[in-house]
Image: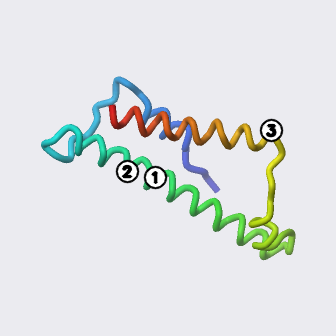
Amino acid sequence: MSKPDQPGAISLLNDPDRKKPQFLDNPGQDKAVAAILRLAMEISVLRDRIDTHEALAEQSGAYTALDVESYNPDPERAARRAARRKSLIEGLMHDLS
């Protein structure tokens, strides 16, 4: 089963030399559309991954939805999450600049 090349897609989005599509006549609005599209892509990937985890958990009985809701990450994982959020925000700000 092949997996999408997400890192390649992200590097393409962040490539300063890529030709950005123009959706609207107003450059500010066009940047907002690009940011919204980036968020939609991120949400789509996350929903698929969450669905996979929930299906695997249900199949194996490994954990429940309550376990997920009450989970507290260790400091290393919390730092990785913070870095991921920072990267997302930087990408959005790049699209808006």
Q: In x, y percent, where is residue 64?
A: 80, 73
Q: Closer to the N terminus: mark 1 or mark 3? A: 1
Give amino acid for label 3. Glu
Rendered residue at 68%/43% (across/down): 81
Asked whether 91 or 57 is in front, the reply is 91
Q: In this image, 47 relative to 24: left or right? A: right
Task: Determine whether label 3 and label 2 are within 8 Å by CB.
Answer: no
Residue 37's label in the rendered image is 2
Q: In x, y percent, where is residue 75?
A: 81, 40
Camera-side mark, 3 or 2: 3
Mark 3–mark 2 distance (CA, rounded to whole Å): 30 Å
Query: Badge 2: how crowded within 10 Å, few (<14), some, or many (20+)?
Result: few
Image position of 81 with respect to 50: above or below: above
Rendered residue at 84%/72% (across/down): 60
Query: Badge 3: how crowded within 10 Å, few (<14), some, or many (20+)?
Result: few
Q: Which residue is mark 1?
A: 41
Tell me which corner region of the image, top left, top right, bottom left or bottom right, holds residue 84: top right
Q: In x, y percent, where is residue 30?
A: 24, 43
Mark 1–mark 3 distance (CA, rounded to whole Å): 26 Å
Q: Secondary structure at mark 2?
A: helix
Rendered residue at 57%/36% (across/down): 86
Q: Which residue is mark 3?
A: 76
Asked whether 7 or 82 is in front, the reply is 82
Query: Badge 1: how crowded within 10 Å, few (<14), some, or many (20+)?
Result: few
Tell me which corner region of the image, top left, top right, bottom left or bottom right, holds residue 46: bottom right
Task: Determine whether label 1 and label 2 are within 8 Å by CB.
Answer: yes
Task: Determine whether label 1 and label 3 are within 8 Å by CB.
Answer: no
Q: Secondary structure at mark 1?
A: helix
